[in-house]
Amino acid sequence: MAEKPQEPSTPRPQSTTEAEPSPGPSSDWEWHGVEAAGWKVAGDLRVRQVASAVVGGALVSMGLKRRSLGGMAMALAGGELISRGTRGRSLIDGIPNLRRRRLTGRAGREEGVVTGGMVMERSVTIQKPGHELYRAWRDVETLSKVVAHFAEVTSVGQDIRHWKMQGPLGKTFEWDSHLVEEHPGELLRWESLKGAPLPGAGEVRFRPAPGDWGTVVTLRLLFNPPGGALGEALLKLFGEAPTALAHKALMRFKSLVETGEIATTERNPAAREGGFSSF
Amino acid sequence: MRALCWNGINDLRVETVGDPGIVNPRDAILKVTMSTTCGSDLHFIDGYIPTMREGDVIGHEFMGEIVDVGRDVKKVSKGDRVVVPSFICCGSCWYCQHDLYSLCDNTNPKAELQEPVFGYPTAGIYGYTHAFGGYAGAHAQYVRVPHADTDCFQVPEGVKDEQALFLSDAAPTGYMGADFCGIQPGQTVAVWGCGGVGLMAMKSAFLLGAERVIGIDRFPERLTLAREKVGAETLNYAEVDSVLDLLKELTGGRGPDACIDAVGMEAHGTGVEYAYDRAKQALHLHSDRGEALRQAILACRKGGTLSILGVYGVMDKFPIGAIMNKGLTVRTAQQHGQKYLPRLLEHVAKGELDPSFLATHRFPLEDAPRGYELFKKKQDGCVRAVFLPN
């Protein structure tokens, strides 16, 4: 079902996500807002403590005002790209019971159009041929390094991966996924197995980039939460995090395959936390 | 080890921190021989740019000796005397492959802090803000250098430590700024700011074929360096009514062919606009004082080149109309040091470039806060304070 390889360079429709009106350029980057308190939020984070805290905490620590979270950062972290990515394309066709829902922070939630599944998509361009990237993504060792910032993934059988993730409020989520479709060098698609707390599916696509740019890698994740209050609560808890985490995973994948390592400030000398601080 | 740490606005202290070790396979550990202050450090010391944390080790301009290497390091080895550009670059991504090193895709582990502000993240830097990666800096006895094969440049015998030191940042930044100008024979280049980067930009403009170079500043001792060490003509903007008029007269009414801003967001000025910027910055309404940049834009001849090396964040009252209507070419970047290092080392080895005159003051690491004080306040003719951590 792979679509014809297509560089996503055609003009996309303007996002419908409205940024809040900004009173002036300074609200976009509040330079003086480096508040010690903000940093402590980020400082106390465990890397695996997923989710909005990672994004939110980081932005707070940059001293961005709440206002700009909605207007700029969140748009970037999630909504804008997703709504662009989904528009006019049959992103979720073929996956039953999954209705479209924009993942755009407040705007998305309050719109109250549909509460069903959610879709996110992120792309990155990598200086390697598609078949090499395909092999790397299929390798569980590579995958485990790439998602190490939010989950542990292990191989538990032929094309079955076990995922373990520290969720919000200290809750651990575990599930299995299995490969359902593959086109060597082009596409891998997987789905969660029965019993997953947040049923979902995902696919990663490898398409040639123009010129000497290499390969466009597009990761698409679909979540189909169980109905009722539990599903709603899960979605709320996860919030915008999946997009940010997936984007980071793509960037980590890129670094790993391009350079053989992932940039880190682990064991970074600092005059705090006993002489080292990774954040 | 001992290291100079940022502990808040205008609060630098030398403290004991952990020793860095090899973390990734392409890492090297450097024993720092010399490190130096940079004007861009003042922006976070003064609190104008965010994402510093108390206890961060600062410093990004340095040279030293390799004392340990990771398993994938092939080109350099223990014992090598090397200089390291301040931007950390992987050497493998599209940007590194195209000599746009400071735009490296793979060295900013905290890209999510920077991306909302710039649209796309840049490379990481040593000892700078967390938006630029938050890597521990080089005003320390030891520093971890990722991607050592790409980022460590062996210093040939005959090139002194103090000459190599400034090839880490001031010289490649200045050289790149002059390179951006596409200098043709007979051309005049004006440079705002006679600090380390500005002086190196002036010298580089001559190396690249400029006929005249005009240095603009208000500190007599810096203007003296521009005249005596670089051979530039100088202009003290505090002593003239109009920099624009003077530059016009000096260039037959045409204006300089290229203008280089080596000042940045904490520019000092004299007029109404300076008062306006100062007030807005003080009220936290914007981050940048843009007097020097505005002047450079207006002074530049029609169809000329504006080369921006000063570090900026967000600015208003930006005369884009002058740029547009005069058809200026704007070139700017953080330094692509890895591109320029080989030819700069050659210039130094041949005796065509000697940046060591920038080192006006030397301190043991323990006195680094005093060094920054002198540097920031430009006391005692300080152009650059050099630290000797070991």
Image (cartoon, helix red, strand yellow):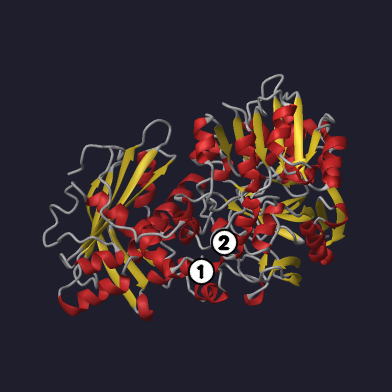
What amino acid is labelled 1 in the image?
Answer: Ser
Q: Position of residue B161 (x, y in %)?
A: 83, 46
Query: The N terminus of chain B lies in which quarter of the figure?
Result: bottom right
Count of marks placed on residues: 2
Chain of the residue that carries numbered disc 2 in the rendered image: B
User: Which mark, residue A123?
Assistant: none
Element carrying mark 1: helix
Chain of the residue that carries numbered disc 1 in the rendered image: A
Q: Nearer the viewer, residue B328 or A218?
A: B328
Say whether residue B382 is left or right of residue A137.
right
Say whether residue A12 is left or right of residue B215.
left
Q: Position of residue A147 (x, y in %)?
A: 40, 61
User: Residue A207: which quarter of the image?
Assistant: top left
Q: Residue furthest top?
A: B185
What amino acid is labelled 2 in the image?
Answer: His
Q: Nearer the viewer, residue B293 or A239?
A: B293
Answer whether residue A117 is visible to the viewer in this image: yes
Q: Position of residue B288 (x, y in %)?
A: 59, 54
User: Residue B46: which quarter of the image?
Assistant: bottom right
Are circles 2 and 1 on residues that touch, CB within 8 Å?
Answer: yes
Question: Which residue is found at the position 53% from the left and 62% from the top?
Answer: B285
Say whether residue B121 is left or right of residue B80.
left
C-alpha separation, residue under disc 2 versus residue under disc 1 = 10 Å
Q: Nearer the viewer, residue A203 or B241?
A: B241
Residues at marks 2 and 1, common chain?
no
Q: Which residue in the protein does label 1 denote?
A: A61
Element carrying mark 2: helix
Question: Which residue is found at the position 24% from the left and 70% from the top?
Answer: A198
Seen in the picture, residue B238 relative to B128 is either above or below; the reply is above
Q: Which residue in the protein does label 2 denote?
A: B130
